[in-house]
């Protein structure tokens, strides 16, 4: 059975990020990772995409199909570049990898907004910081107030997160890797659209656009079938090769 390794992004851990993907367990082995700093793991003082990319890369088995959402998409891109021999396919959902699209005014403004939030946002108030962050990324998630413990831990991890605008994505190395790539976006935010356009072009990736679910594109009712079809085709191509 093919393994899907699912890497969550900011705020929400793996079990909540990928709950709509649970039916795929009938066809694939689902490996839902819970990154450092997220329940049931203890809090951490610093969240770093480079550290987490190494952690994810160490957990890959040959032929794994790596899937990353948002900040987890940045991590997945970096992990796949570290272990291209172990990757059967790579799927990223709206990764905020702004450096790949430097010079695009919309992306530059999005990155600058993130810099401003982390520099001057209400870091001592995780709930207020989370609300500002959700607006910035175009999420339709409305957290309860006060935040429940699990969500509060995710919000505190967000405050301590290394900004994804610092991530250097090795596009040439990824483009040269033989595994298929899929880029998924939700047509809700021009910066994410622009980043995904670059990834589609530079990685020679397939592209799926699923509108209507904001930044949580994996909750779209058609997402699972698109992912399953892509993984099955990638697996078949590897078998033939």
Image (spheres, grey):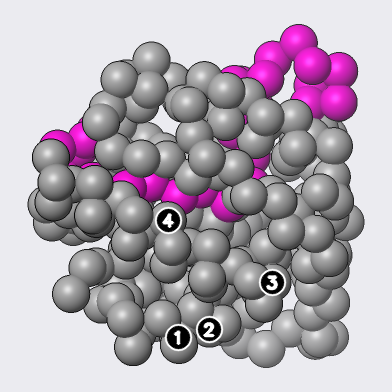
Which mark lies nearer to you, 2 or 4?
A: 4
Secondary element at image label 3? loop
C-alpha gap between disc 3 and disc 4: 16 Å
Q: Mark 1 points at which residue?
A: 22
Q: Name the residue under label 3.
A: 220
C-alpha gap between disc 4 and disc 1: 17 Å
C-alpha gap between disc 2 and disc 4: 20 Å
Residue that extends furthest to the top in the rendered view of this protein: 103
Residue 133, x across and y down, in percent? 79, 54
**Does 16 appear above or below 103?**
below
Specify which label sits upstream in the sequence, 2 or 3.
2
Specify which label sits upstream in the sequence, 3 or 4.
3
* Magenta span includes 30: no
C-alpha gap between disc 1 and disc 3: 14 Å
Q: Mark 4 points at which residue?
A: 230
Whether pointer 1 and pointer 2 mark residues with C-beta atoms closer than 8 Å, the reply is yes
Look at the image and give the residue range highlighted in magenta: 82-109
Left or right for 87, reference 193 = left
Specify which label sits upstream in the sequence, 1 or 3.
1
Q: Mark 2 points at which residue?
A: 19
Residue drawn at point x = 74 percent, y = 40 percent: 192
Callout 2 environment at 10 Å: few (<14), some (14 to 19), or many (20+)? few
Q: Is residue 55 visible?
A: no
Secondary element at image label 2? helix
């Amino acid at each position: 059975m093919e393994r899907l390794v699912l890497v969550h992004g900011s705020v929400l851990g793996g079990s909540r990020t990928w709950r709509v993907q649970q039916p795929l367990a009938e066809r694939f082995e689902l490996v839902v990772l819970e990154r450092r700093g997220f329940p049931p793991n203890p809090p951490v003082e610093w969240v770093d995409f480079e550290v987490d990319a190494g952690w994810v890369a160490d957990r890959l088995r040959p032929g794994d199909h790596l899937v990353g959402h948002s900040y987890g998409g940045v991590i997945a891109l970096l992990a796949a570049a570290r272990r291209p021999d172990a990757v059967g396919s790579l799927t990223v959902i709206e990764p905020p990898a702004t450096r790949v699209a430097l010079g695009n005014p919309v992306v530059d403004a999005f990155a600058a907004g993130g810099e401003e939030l982390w520099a001057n946002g209400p870091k001592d108030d995780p709930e207020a910081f989370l609300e500002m962050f959700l607006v910035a990324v175009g999420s339709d998630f409305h957290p309860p107030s006060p935040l429940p413990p699990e969500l509060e831990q995710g919000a505190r991890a967000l405050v301590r997160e290394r900004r994804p605008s610092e991530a250097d994505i090795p596009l040439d190395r990824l483009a040269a890797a033989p595994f298929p790539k899929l880029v998924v976006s939700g047509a809700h935010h021009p910066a994410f659209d622009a980043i995904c356009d670059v990834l589609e072009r530079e990685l020679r990736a397939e592209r799926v656009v699923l509108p209507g679910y904001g930044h949580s594109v994996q909750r779209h009712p058609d997402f699972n079938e698109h992912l399953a079809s892509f993984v099955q085709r990638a697996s078949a191509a590897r078998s033939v090769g």
